[in-house]
Amino acid sequence: INVVEAQRLARTLLTTYLGRQTSERVLAGEITRGQGERIRAAVWFCDLRGYTAMMAALGSFPMIDVMNRYFDCMAEAVWSEGGEILKFMGDAMLVVFRLTDDRDAPTVARSAVRAAQLALKNLAVLSESRVQRGEIPLEAGVSVHIGHVVYGNIGASTRLDFTVMGHSVNLVARIQGLAGDTNESLLVSAEVAEHLGDDVESIGFYLLKGISDPVEVFRLSGSVES
């Protein structure tokens, strides 16, 4: 195998496992523990409802197929709106829609919410086909928040993870937990809602674990279009 082919294979593998933007950073040599940058982004979090019970009912190997199909629904929607998947965590997926010179907060907020709408729509279609075959239906929740995160390397000296960290990540995960408690499929923070106009409505202020002040949370009241 020649050098060019080896580089192509390395790039393909890194993109498959890390995503396009993160893989480019790793290939550029950003592989030092603690190396990173503070960015502003829409942080997007989803998880599958009833995961533990479904795993118990189906068993590990059949559940792999279920998870792959579920993640396909989520991922295709995220990619269609310019988001990058940073991490799969059991039945959950962590995504960022990074603000850039060409994509401001209103653009990113609407992109992230459109991705959530499409992901949930895709999953509903998959779930209906499963129900028609007598299989367990699938439901998921999505949460979205805009804030600052640290984007970079964290881990042990010889095993690193390129991810995002910070208050915004904790907040979006707590909002996701609230989505399950309130049986809402999509919830967003006030920082996202301010860019959605009349397409959202407040469901109130909530005390969330690890968050000092009550957080106002919103659900969609309309469909967010381009």
Image (spheres, rainbow, N blue to C red):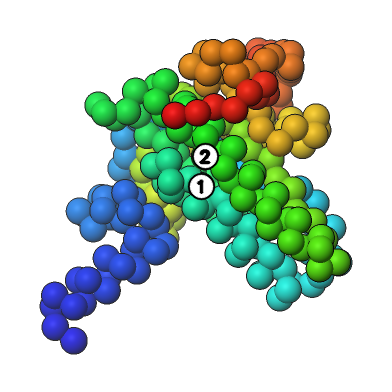
Q: Quadrant of the N terminus?
A: bottom left
Residue 101 pos. (x, y %): 25, 26
- Image quarter of the C terminus: top left
Left or right: 73, with 166 as reference point: right
Residue 1 position (above or below residue 196): below
Q: Nearer the viewer, residue 156 or 173?
A: 173
Q: Residue furthest bottom?
A: 1
Identify the residue at horizontal 59%, vertical 28% (top origin): 223
Badge 2 element: helix
In terms of depth relative to the viewer, which is nearer, 173 or 211? Answer: 173
The residue depicted at 65 percent of the width and 28 percent of the height is: 187
SS at badge 1: helix
Is any part of residue 218 visible from this angle? no
Q: Position of residue 164 (x, y in %)?
A: 44, 40
Q: Amino acid at mark 2?
A: Ala
Q: Residue at x 27, y 65 (%)?
A: 11
User: Is any atom of residue 96 visible in this view?
Assistant: yes
Q: Residue tagged by mark 1? A: 77
Compared with 201, 77 (above or below) is below
Give the percent coordinates (x, y) of residue 212: 65, 16
- Asked if residue 106 lies left or right of residue 139, the reply is left
- Tag 2 and tag 1, C-beta contact below 8 Å: yes
Checking the image for residue 115, the label placed there is 2
Q: Is residue 55 left or right of residue 36?
A: right
